[in-house]
């Protein structure tokens, strides 16, 4: 039980770092929030680790894969959340009918 909790905590910590670095790697303004950045980082860390493990690669390759996948996730979410001119297409609390 403790081992599983430690693993989950490490995924959150590593995911937050990977998400923050991936967000810094993507140029321009990123309208996604901190929580979504952490979630993208966690997903990138998990997927990158699985791919590196399947290839039999080491930790450094897993980190590179994690950063690339998280950066792709940040770009995808940023493009979904903005209009063509770079402004947000949806703002919390505003209704558009």
Image (spheres, grey):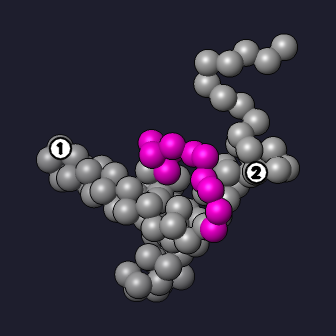
Helix, strand or loop: magenta stretch: loop
Q: Mark 2 or mark 1: which comes first in sequence?
A: 1
The image quadrant of residue 72 is: bottom right
| Distance of label 2 from label 1 (alpha carbons) | 45 Å
Q: Residue at x 57, y 45 (%)?
A: 32
User: Where in the figure is residue 48, as x and y percent of width and height?
Assistant: 51, 69
Question: What x and y, as percent, mark residue 12?
Answer: 34, 52
Q: Which mark is residue 62?
A: none
Residue 10 vertical position relative to residue 65 in the rendered view, above or below: above
In the displayed structure image, the side of residue 88 where residue 38 appears, left or right: left
- For the C terminus, give its image quadrant: top right
- Residue 57: x and y in percent read 46, 85
Q: Which residues are magenta?
A: 27-37
Q: Is residue 48 above or below residue 1?
A: below
Is 5 left, or right, of 15 in this rendering?
left
In the image, residue 35 lies in the stretch drawn in magenta: yes
Q: Quadrant of the N terminus?
A: top left
95 lies above or below 8? above
Callout 2: SS: loop
Task: Give the residue at x 51% y 67%.
Answer: 24
Q: Is residue 30 magenta?
A: yes
Residue 54 in view in this figure: no
Say what secondary structure mark 1 lies in: loop
Residue under label 1, please give it: 1
Q: Quadrant of residue 94?
A: top right
Q: Nearest the camera: 64 or 37? A: 37
The residue singled out by tag 2 in the image is: 86
The residue positioned 66% from the left and 29% from the top of the image is: 91
Residue at left 40%, top 58%? 15
53 vs 79, left or right, is: left
Q: In the rendering, at what x and y percent does residue 89 appear?
A: 76, 36
Residue 46 appears left or right of 89: left
């Amino acid at each position: 039980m403790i081992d599983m909790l430690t693993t989950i905590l490490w995924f959150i910590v590593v995911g937050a770092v990977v998400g923050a670095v991936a967000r810094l790697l993507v140029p321009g303004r990123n309208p996604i929030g901190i929580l979504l950045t952490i979630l993208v980082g966690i997903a990138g860390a998990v997927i990158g680790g699985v791919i590196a493990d399947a290839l039999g690669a080491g930790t450094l390759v897993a980190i590179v894969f994690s950063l690339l996948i998280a950066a792709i996730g940040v770009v995808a979410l940023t493009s979904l959340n903005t209009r063509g001119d770079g402004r947000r297409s949806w703002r919390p609390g505003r209704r558009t009918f």
